[in-house]
Amino acid sequence: MGAEEVMAMDKFIALPQVRQDHIAAAAMKVFGAVGYKKAYVSDIAAAAGISKALIFHYFGNKKTLYFYLIEYTGKIMMAEVWENRETANADFFEKVVDATKKKLAIMNRYPAMTGFLASIFYENDPEVAEQIKTLFSQGGEIRHQITIEGSDKRKFKDGVDPELVLDILVKYAEGLVGSRLDSIRPMDEIMLEFTRCLNMLKSNLYKEEFLT
């Protein structure tokens, strides 16, 4: 991010929080609906009820706005999930359930976030794709710290790789979020299906003595 973009962002951050949230929600809704390439600044401005010039005034360009939104959603998620990780249950699957419930609750409070986050996983525009991959790799490290570290790995059968299990669950969860976009599925229904999947994996991957 260049100096001009940083200065522009300072102007945005100086706005009241409710105003920042309103503009962020409008932008996430547009990006989530059409993706990065087809999201026009004029459409984002119209959704936010402000002028196109103000978007450039606050962010400098569309790319800076896009990655600000990724950072914005990440901070909201981490404030809820990361800060409570030390008191989380030591069971791997319960840690996954706990983190997922918190994320879904946040997405329920911020409806535009659901579509935006789902769209990021399928974004392939060369202007942003490589940077998104880098952010995903960083996200993987954070998921490891939240879920793998501190969990009781003795419960897994010999030969089971918790990292691989977590990777499978992350991809499955992404698919569930995407299915909600297609059919407006209730969050409770998604969580129930996800929990059933976890219970099935747990019954097959845990040693017998840890299933009672």
Image (cartoon, rainbow, N blue to C red):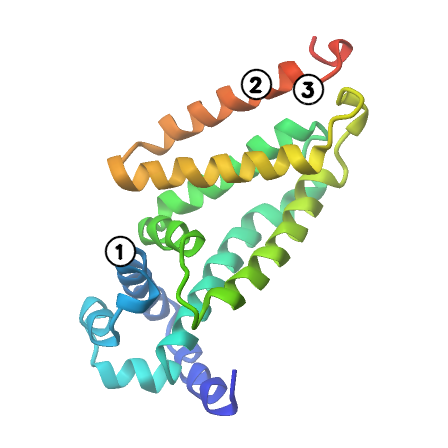
- The type of residue carrying mark 3 is Leu
Q: Are marks 2 and 3 in contact (CB under 8 Å)?
A: no
Upstream in sequence: badge 3 or badge 1: 1
**Pointer 3 residue:** 205
Label 3 to label 1, Cα distance in Å? Answer: 38 Å
Residue occupying the point 39% across, 40% down: 177
- Percent of width and height locating residue 189: 36, 26
Callouts 3 and 1 close, C-beta under 8 Å: no
Sequence-wise first label, 1 or 2 = 1
Reply above or below: 53 against 203.
below
Relative to 148, residue 202 above or below: above
Classed neighbour count for the residue bearing mark 2: other residues with Cα under 10 Å, few (<14), some (14–19), many (≥20): some
In this rendering, the label closer to the viewer, 2 or 3? 3
Disc number at residue 33? Answer: 1
Residue 121 image point, x, y percent: 44, 52
Residue located at (32% from left, 37% from top): 180
Q: Is residue 121 left or right of residue 84?
A: left
**Quarter the C terminus occupies:** top right
| Quarter assignment of residue 34 | bottom left
Q: Amino acid at mark 2?
A: Asn
Name the residue tied to disc 2: 199
Q: Quadrant of residue 23?
A: bottom left
Cα–Cα span, label 1 and label 2: 33 Å
Question: What number is the disc on residue 62?
Answer: none
Extreme residue toward the bottom, this view: 4
Left or right placement of residue 128 versus residue 162 in this view = left
Secondary structure beneath label 2:
helix
Q: Residue placed at 68% from the left, 19% from the top?
A: 205
x, y percent for residue 115: 33, 50
Query: Mark 2 or mark 3: which comes first in sequence?
Result: 2
The residue at 33%/87% (across/down) is 57
At label 1, which amino acid type do we have? Answer: Ala
